Amino acid sequence: MLSAQERAQITQVWDLIAGHEAQFGAELLLRLFTVYPSTKGYFPHLSACQDATQLLSHGQRMLAAVGAAVQHMDDLRAALSPLADLHALVLRVDPANFPLLIQCFQVVLASHLQDEFTVEMQAAWDKFLTGVAVVLTEKYR
Amino acid sequence: MSNFTAEDKAAITSLWAKVNVEDAGGETLGRLLVVYPWTQRFFDSFGSLSSPSAIMGNPKVKAHGVKVLTSLGEAIKNLDDLKGTFGQLSELHCDKLHVDPENFRLLGNVLVCVLARNFGKEFTPQVQAVFQKVVAGVATAMAHKYH
């Protein structure tokens, strides 16, 4: 599904994020809550006070999972299986929300990487994150 | 539909004044065609769309992108009446061009990414929120006359 070039783009971008998972993750969540307030309902503990420490901590966890997905691009289903179970059985985030998160992710990347954020990177990451979202919602029914 | 506060309008006009529509137009439409290749279905007459560099360098893509963002610039002066502003364009895109309104939402999202890329840190969550509201309003206005 992902070409060799796309894999390279994905890894290239991840190398720029790695080490800054908490910061990127926190900004991702902040953008999600600010732009799409209805998503706050899924994070009651986080969104009420938007405490920086908690956003960093949860952001770190989310981006670490993205990092794991990058390491296992060829076998997302196996790598993300526990998270897929979590989303299906416990979190039950409506699938319509994943494109909102993906949009915010693209904006985080674009605003940080700026000129380095090539069209090929944007395309590869959109495809990749959409694939991740499919896996995370696959066990819903 | 969307209500824009005085603060929203100030933020929007202030950022938009700094946008180079020549550059951003081609960038936005180009990225739409690359990231969501099925959108190319409307542009058979545009010549080569065979690769990202062909698309981004295509003069017809650039020209059309500029046209789209110029329209958007006009809308930004009329945020309280987006439906009125886009009435005729909506009819055109439905009756003649047969463009699925989902494409307006995709284009809007790509524009937000292009703005984020151009403005970096200045494109804060609050600024993003306001511009997402603009593009959502435009997409709705563009779909309004569909039947």
Image: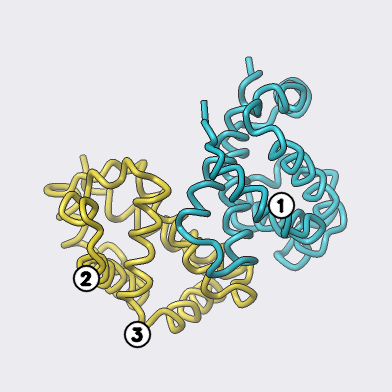
Q: Residue furthest top?
A: B147
Instruction: Please give the residue where the numbered disc 1 appears in the rendered image.
Output: B29
Q: CA distance from mark 3 to mark 2?
A: 17 Å
Q: Secondary structure at mark 2?
A: helix
Q: Which residue is mark 3?
A: A19
Q: Is residue A83 left or right of residue B121?
A: left
Residue B3 position (above or below residue A72): above
- CA gap, disc 1 and disc 2: 39 Å
Badge 2 crowding class, 10 Å Cα cut-off, few under 14, some 14 to 19, many 20 or more, is few
Mark 2 is on which residue type?
Answer: Thr
- The percent coordinates of residue A92 (x first, y second) are 20, 44
User: Chain letter of disc 1?
Assistant: B
Instruction: Count neighbours of disc 1 (C-alpha within 10 A) and say few if under 14, some if 14 to 19, many if 20 or more.
Output: many
Residue that appears at 41% across and 60% down: A129
Which dot marks residue A53? 2
Q: What residue is rendered at 27% in x and 62% in y?
A: A77
Q: Is residue B146 left or right of residue A82?
A: right
For the residue marked with disc 1, what is the amino acid?
Answer: Leu
> In the image, which lettered chain appears cyan?
B
Q: Is residue B60 above or below residue A72?
A: above
User: Do the residues indicated by labels 1 and 3 lie within the same chain of the protein?
Assistant: no
